Image (cartoon, grey):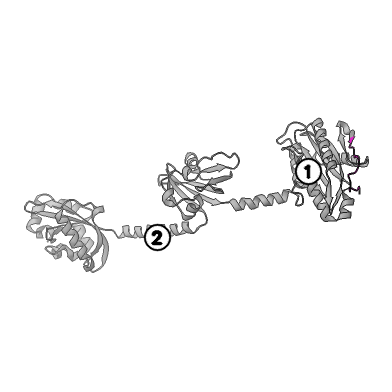
């Protein structure tokens, strides 16, 4: 006997009105109940879902299918529905558990809709097993929790935006980095919450989110940027950014990963400075000087004639031997500072070792080089070094040679300047020797003058 032949009079009314075929064809479990909550009819899907035969449920209260602990909520929901009988979509129903014939339970979504049966208003109940949905929700929840814990634990700042570059999420590190709370950052354009300045140009940098969305691929910051924080402070930052795509491959936003590299870059700059500068005087060391000289000779950055000067202090060794190395070191520091003050901004002054210095005069032809070299000689000659109440004077022998991009090697240029300096020292010192084209030399000697009081020549 089929459920149709056992239907109550109301069930016959439903059949006569053509509802039976709809119930049987529906993909979800459905049943019709009266205002008292008694089951009038149910479809085959409901029989399969609950494991009850139709004849075992007809006339029984619908609470038969609800576990005891959920019945009060179900009854209250039905009462509320009776006070306002209108369709309740699946999403507006109540989530609870249903009970099968064997006593097992499953999470169910129940929604109710009114049916006009003439003499009374019946209720169509749609029941859906949402076990898989709940499992998926639990999986997503756990994954989200895991992701949030991970994002909160990592040392990098993570920010996500929508396709318009508006911030949707920022982890705690990002809040600390940008200097504003998540509630203040979410909903703001990334460029506003994350104002970056190019270290190279000092100008505002393009938002990494905008660039990523425009170019459509992941990228990392090869350039160096500083972040202007809300409190006015600045941090040097490194970043990487990648598009967030949906299943269709369309970019729906970006994820930006930022890290504070202020200390890292400070250490890098310090290490580079230590590797390229003399520890005693702070001037460029020999290795860095030769690198810059080689760059000019190879034609990188300059096209015109430049000049190279080689300087060797006169009468330094006697002072160093008489007063000690501490005095010698202090004198070298003073001479280094003195010579630096006589340089043009584009020029390079280096200490090559001992009491030897070198000057690279970029884009400086012979005439200008002679003038600068003479100023250096006068500066050293006029300097008075005082140690333990005694004053000392010294001079400097300078050799100058022209350097032209594409002509000669670094070794040849250094040798020519060194030879000119050696010639100047051999002629009595405290003079400038100029190497002319073809290897000829000319010199200009300084006027030593008389010693000042309490000054002794060593």
> Does the magenta stretch mainly form a helix, a strand or a loop?
loop
Could you tell me residue 381's position as x and y percent?
85, 41
**What residue is rendered at 86% in x and 31% in y?**
437
193 and 213: which one is in front? 193
Identify the disc placed on residue 338: 1
* Foreground tag (1 vs 2): 1
Pointer 1 or 2: first along the chain: 2
Q: Is residue 134 above or below residue 204?
A: below
Q: In this view, does 216 lie above or below 42?
A: above
Q: Is residue 103 magenta?
A: no
Label 2: which residue? 142
Could you tell me residue 182's position as x and y percent?
43, 51
Identify the disc placed on residue 92: none
So how many labels did they put on this image?
2
* Secondary structure of residue under mark 2: helix
Please indicate whether residue 251 sits to the left or right of residue 420 in the image: left
**What residue is rendered at 12% in x and 55% in y?**
122
Range of residues picked out in magenta: 444-456
Please indicate whether residue 59 sits to the left or right of residue 393 in the image: left
Residue lying furthest right: 427
**What residue is rendered at 17% in x and 66% in y?**
64
125 and 365: which one is in front? 365
């Amino acid at each position: 006997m089929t459920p149709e032949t056992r239907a109550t009079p109301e069930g016959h009314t439903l059949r006569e009105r053509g509802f039976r075929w709809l119930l049987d064809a529906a993909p979800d479990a459905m049943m019709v109940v009266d205002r008292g909550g008694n089951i009038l009819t149910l479809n085959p899907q409901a029989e399969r879902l609950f494991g009850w035969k139709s004849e075992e449920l007809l006339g029984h209260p619908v609470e038969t299918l609800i576990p005891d602990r959920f019945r009060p909520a179900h009854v209250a929901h039905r009462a509320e529905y009776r006070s306002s009988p209108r369709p309740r979509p699946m999403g507006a129903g109540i989530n609870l558990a249903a009970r099968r014939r064997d006593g097992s339970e499953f999470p169910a979504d129940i929604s109710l809709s009114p049916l006009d049966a003439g003499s009374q208003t019946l209720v169509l109940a749609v029941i859906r097993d949402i076990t898989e949905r709940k499992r998926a929700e639990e999986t997503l929840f756990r994954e989200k929790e895991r992701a949030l814990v991970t994002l909160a634990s990592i040392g990098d700042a993570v920010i996500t935006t929508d396709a318009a570059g508006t911030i949707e999420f920022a982890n705690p590190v990002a809040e600390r980095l940008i200097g504003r709370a998540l509630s203040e950052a979410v909903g703001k354009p990334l460029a506003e919450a994350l104002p970056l300045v190019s270290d190279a140009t000092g100008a505002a940098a393009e938002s990494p989110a905008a660039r990523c969305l425009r170019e459509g691929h992941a990228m990392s910051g090869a350039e160096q940027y500083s972040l202007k924080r809300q409190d006015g402070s600045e941090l040097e930052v490194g970043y990487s950014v990648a598009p967030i795509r949906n299943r269709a491959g369309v970019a729906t936003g970006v994820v930006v990963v930022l890290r504070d590299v202020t200390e890292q870059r400070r250490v890098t700059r310090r290490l580079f400075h230590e590797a390229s500068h003399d520890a005693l005087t702070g001037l460029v060391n020999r290795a860095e000087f030769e690198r810059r000289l080689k760059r000019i000779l190879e034609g990188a950055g300059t096209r015109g004639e430049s000049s190279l000067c080689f300087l060797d202090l006169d009468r330094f060794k006697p002072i160093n031997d008489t007063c000690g190395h501490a005095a010698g070191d202090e004198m070298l520091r003073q001479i280094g500072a003195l010579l630096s003050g006589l340089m043009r901004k584009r020029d390079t002054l280096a200490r090559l070792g001992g009491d030897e210095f070198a000057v690279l005069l970029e884009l400086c032809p012979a005439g200008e080089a002679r003038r600068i070299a003479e100023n250096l000689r006068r500066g050293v000659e006029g300097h008075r070094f005082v140690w333990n109440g005694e004053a000392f004077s010294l001079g400097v022998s300078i050799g100058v040679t022209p350097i032209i991009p594409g002509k000669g090697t670094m070794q040849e240029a250094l040798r020519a300047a060194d030879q000119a300096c050696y010639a100047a020292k051999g002629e009595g010192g405290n003079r400038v020797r100029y190497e002319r084209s073809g290897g000829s030399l000319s010199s200009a000697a300084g006027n030593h003058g008389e010693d000042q009081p309490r000054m002794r020549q060593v």
